[in-house]
Image (cartoon, helix red, strand yellow):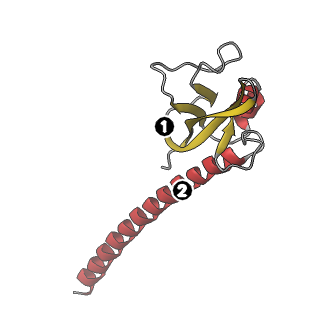
């Protein structure tokens, strides 16, 4: 009888631990995704990306183009993939930005995403200076996409 009780309570404990571990993993995934969204917001606010004005979530396209030409920055942000993609106005195909086709392009890729990663994104204003009789900021809707490793 005592052996049956020990086995019963052992099974109950195993079920409890398995459900607890599942909840811990779920909470860990949620926290990881929240961390990625905060990382995206902080990326938009870094001096390397931010517009000169104090607008929130504004990315300077001219700075982004200059940074894209420096591959040393690909390891600076400690992510597995980083891309800024224009959402509006929408082009029919993906055109990677470089000095030759800027501003008639729609994607800035800093770090190519790797396999077994998960993507998180946030919308930002992608602004650049233009001149038509006077200088002004032309802003378009874009999103920053960050890929990080999936938790095991």
Query: First in sequence: mark 2 or mark 1?
Result: 2
Q: Residue at x 74, y 46 (%)?
A: 46
The reply, left or right, for residue 42 in relation to residue 147 is: right
The reply, left or right, for residue 26 in relation to residue 146 is: left
Q: Residue at x 23, y 81 (%)?
A: 4
Q: Farthest residue in the top direction? A: 100
Residue situated in front as seen by the camera: 142 or 26 = 142
Q: Looking at the picture, does residue 45 appear above or below residue 15? A: above
Q: What residue did someone put label 2 on?
A: 34
**Alpha-carbon span between mark 2 and mark 1:** 19 Å
Q: Position of residue 95 (x, y in %)?
A: 55, 18
Q: What residue did someone put label 1 on?
A: 116
Q: Residue at x 59, y 42 (%)?
A: 124
Residue situated in front as seen by the camera: 64 or 78 = 64
Q: Looking at the picture, does residue 25 appear above or below residue 137? A: below
Q: Secondary structure at mark 1?
A: loop
Q: Quadrant of residue 67?
A: top right
Name the image quarter holding the N terminus.
bottom left
Q: Residues within 10 Å of mark 1 (few under 14, many from 20)?
A: few
Q: From this viewpoint, is residue 137 visible?
A: yes
Residue situated in front as seen by the camera: 148 or 5 = 148
The numbered dot on residue 91 is: none
Q: Quadrant of residue 38?
A: bottom right
Q: Secondary structure at mark 2?
A: helix
Q: Farthest residue in the left direction? A: 1
Q: Looking at the picture, does residue 68 appear above or below residue 30? A: above
Q: Position of residue 13 (x, y in %)?
A: 35, 75
Q: Residues within 10 Å of mark 2 (few under 14, many from 20)?
A: few
Q: From this viewpoint, is residue 114 visible?
A: no
Q: How many marks?
A: 2
Residue situated in front as seen by the camera: 35 or 57 = 57
For the residues bearing labels 2 and 1, Cβ distance under 8 angstroms:
no
């Amino acid at each position: 009888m005592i052996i049956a009780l020990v086995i019963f309570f052992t099974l109950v404990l195993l079920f409890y631990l398995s459900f607890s571990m599942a909840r811990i993993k779920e909470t860990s995934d949620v926290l990881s995704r929240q961390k990625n969204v905060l990382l995206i917001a902080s990326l938009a606010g870094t001096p390397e990306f931010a517009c000169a004005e104090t607008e929130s979530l504004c990315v300077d396209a001219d700075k982004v183009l200059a940074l894209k030409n420096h591959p040393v920055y690909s390891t600076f942000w400690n992510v597995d993939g980083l891309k800024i993609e224009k959402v509006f106005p929408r082009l029919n195909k993906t055109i990677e930005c470089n000095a030759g086709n800027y501003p008639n392009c729609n994607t800035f890729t800093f770090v190519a995403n790797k396999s077994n990663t998960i993507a998180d994104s946030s919308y930002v204003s992608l602004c650049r200076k233009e001149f038509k009789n006077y200088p002004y900021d032309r802003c378009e809707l874009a999103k920053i996409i960050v890929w990080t490793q999936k938790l095991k």
